[in-house]
Amino acid sequence: MPELPDVETYKRYIDATALHKTVKKVAIDASDLLEGISKTSLQRHLRDRQLVSTRRHGKYLFVQLSDERWLVFHFGMTGRLKYFRDLDDTPPYTDMLIEFDNGFHLAYIAPRKLGMIGLINDTDRFVRQRQLGPDAMDVTLQQFEESARGRRSAVKTWLMNQRVIAGIGNVYSDEILFHAGIHPKANIKDLQEPQIKRLFEALREVIHTAVNAQADPKKMPSTYLTPRRGNAKQCPRCGGLLDQVTIGGRTAYFCPKCQSG
Ligand SMILES: [Zn+2]
């Protein structure tokens, strides 16, 4: 599922490909993904505009148009982007296809139809309306400590709450907890100050490393848990068997030996 490192990779991908190109036409196949705008209205707003800049907050990607409005993308469970020339290369399940005047195309693909496409005037207002917490790449220790205060829930659930910190989902909450040596079911109210600090340091380290690895588990260090998600895998630290537990409907992977704190 696309989390901050994935969406940051998509952002840099757009920056390196489709930015400063002019939209010729737009095909939209999945009107149910559109939020607050109709298909024809979105097509009209995009036509003849350039994509001029990008911004990301948590799992949302914003692409500014030359008329100052912003396209918003959320990638749901499996969404992604692809920039290519030949129409024959259009990926299956493409929901929106932008054609640029240089002959290239940008596809937004969300096979499980859980993503979102919108058009907004103000990204800060959008972040406020969605009640998103600080972005996981920018959050400060002080903000982190403040949002932990008075909370009582499994620490994994807390980390995944977009109103606390925006950008962390199932995979990276496991990775962060693994590096912090904290059990995913530990209650946030029982964590001591040094554990909260350790959790924050782990968050910084994991997000930074995953963004540098372009969210590709194969490019992550061998000390990482993410490449070992799955049945009967070994802990990269102690070699013991990883365990799994369901928390809030999501499967968490963890090492029962290394994450007892
Ligand atoms: Zn272990």
Image: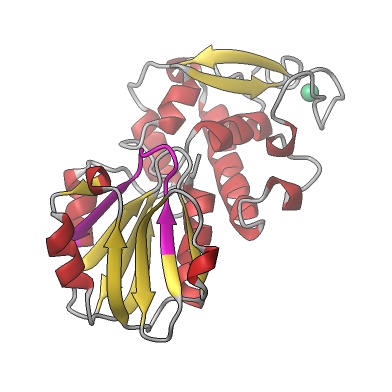
Q: Position of residue 137 (x, y in %)?
A: 47, 53
Question: Is residue 162 depicted above or below 52 in this figure?
Answer: above
Any part of residue 236 in sight: yes
Q: Is residue 230 magenta?
A: no
Residue 195 occupies which quadrant of the picture? top right
Please give the name of the residue rendered at 77% of the width and 48% of the height, measured from the top-left corner.
221
Quarter in which the C terminus is drawn: top right
User: Looking at this view, is 197 or 177 the one in front?
Assistant: 177
- Outermost residue to the bottom: 102
Please give the name of the residue rendered at 53% of the width and 66% of the height, measured from the top-left corner.
88
User: Looking at this view, is 133 or 13 the one in front?
Assistant: 13
Please give the name of the residue rendered at 50% of the width and 39% of the height, measured from the top-left corner.
1
User: Looking at this view, is 23 or 239 the one in front?
Assistant: 23
Q: Position of residue 228 (x, y in %)?
A: 74, 32
Q: Is residue 108 magenta?
A: yes
Residue 25 occupies which quadrant of the picture? bottom left
Is residue 256 shown left or right of residue 89?
right
The range drawn in magenta is: 107-122
The quarter of the rendering in which ligand 1 is drawn is top right
Scheme by which the image is coloured: secondary structure
Q: Position of residue 97 (x, y in %)?
A: 37, 63
Residue 233 occupies which quadrant of the picture? top right
Please give the name of the residue rendered at 32% of the width and 79% of the height, measured from the top-left corner.
52
- Outermost residue to the front: 88
